Amino acid sequence: MPLPLALSLNLPNPYQSWAPWLKSPSGQALLAIERRWLEQRLVDQFGYHALQVGPSEINALASNRMLCKARISFFAPQPGDSDEEDQQLVCHPDALPVESESVDLVVLVHCLELVSDPHSLLREAERVLIPEGRLVVLGFNPYSLWALHQPLATRYFPPAENPWLSLGRLKDWCRVLGMTPDGGSAALYRPILSKPRWWDRLAWLEAAGNRWWPGLGAIYLLSAVKRREGMRMMKTNWRQRRASASSQVVVGSSVRTSE
């Protein structure tokens, strides 16, 4: 890593509508919230290799400190879409061209709802993760007000051709694949609105949603750790070791010589 650009799959790119949609009030809110989530979750995630899968408009690895980072897309970028086209790998979602158990961190950015077989993509993410590696998923909630806009496919809504994956089902799939969910967040309880003034007037729904109906947020983040059966991570208690070392008494043996 960084990885070179692979051959194009010549598939229609639904991410082309991301750029104009992210300029809308709902798109700007999504960017702000997800950037804050990713900064909090990934700034202290250490390792050697990090991989982002999804649209380049959302730089999920910006705050992470790993030196080797790469991006994967399922659609060939168009000229001018990104300043880092030569660092994106275009591949099929059913077979990521990454060595098994070689990546410390995988971030799936709104891509499970864009593939026909999300379980296969999740299985590929688990395959490339090292034991105790971390998976972070950003997704859309099918039980939200945003789901009502999905059939409209307007310029004020992100592309999402396939059914959305609920947070509960995603957790179940992670457990089946040997990954343990260890954290999550949800946000955006307002409907899709094109006018900033109406978006601002409904800001009170965010506080109400976080308190009264947290399961109805339009977007969610799920964090999970890949576990290896029979493997146990041992942590050293440095305070106890220092105390033990300071209390040790050196015993010397005296040698008596006979004359």
Image (cartoon, helix red, strand yellow):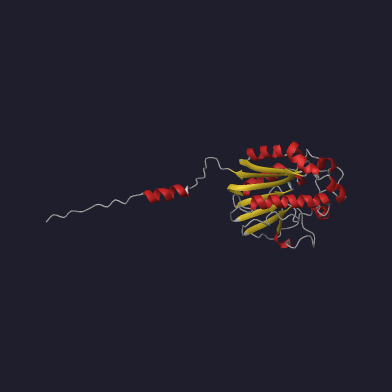
Query: Residue 11, can we see it?
Result: no
Coordinates of residue 70 in the picture (x, y in percent):
67, 57
Question: Is 41 situated left or right of 26 in this image?
Answer: left
Q: Quadrant of the C terminus?
A: bottom left
Residue at the (68%, 53%) spot, across then down: 52
Residue beneath the point at 65% across and 49% down: 41
Residue 4, compared with residue 225, is above or below; it is below
Q: Residue 89 versus residue 218: which sits nearer the camera?
A: 218
Horizontal arrangement in the rendering, residue 155 relative to residue 90 (left or right): right
Please provide percent x and percent y for residue 71. 69, 56
The image shows residue 45 at horizontal and vertical percentages of: 61, 52
Classify the position of the N terminus by image quarter: bottom right
Q: Considering depth in this image, is 6 or 140 the residue closer to the camera?
A: 140
Residue 195, position as x, y percentages in the image: 88, 50
Query: In the orientation shown, which residue stands out farthest toward the left?
Result: 259
Residue drawn at x 83%, y 51% as measured from the top left:
25
Identify the residue shown where x is 40% and y is 48%: 244
Q: Nearer the viewer, residue 235 or 69?
A: 235
Q: Is residue 177 toward the left or the right of residue 93 in the image?
A: left
Q: Is residue 40 visible in the rendered structure shown here?
A: yes
Q: How many marks?
A: 0
Res 116 → quadrant: top right
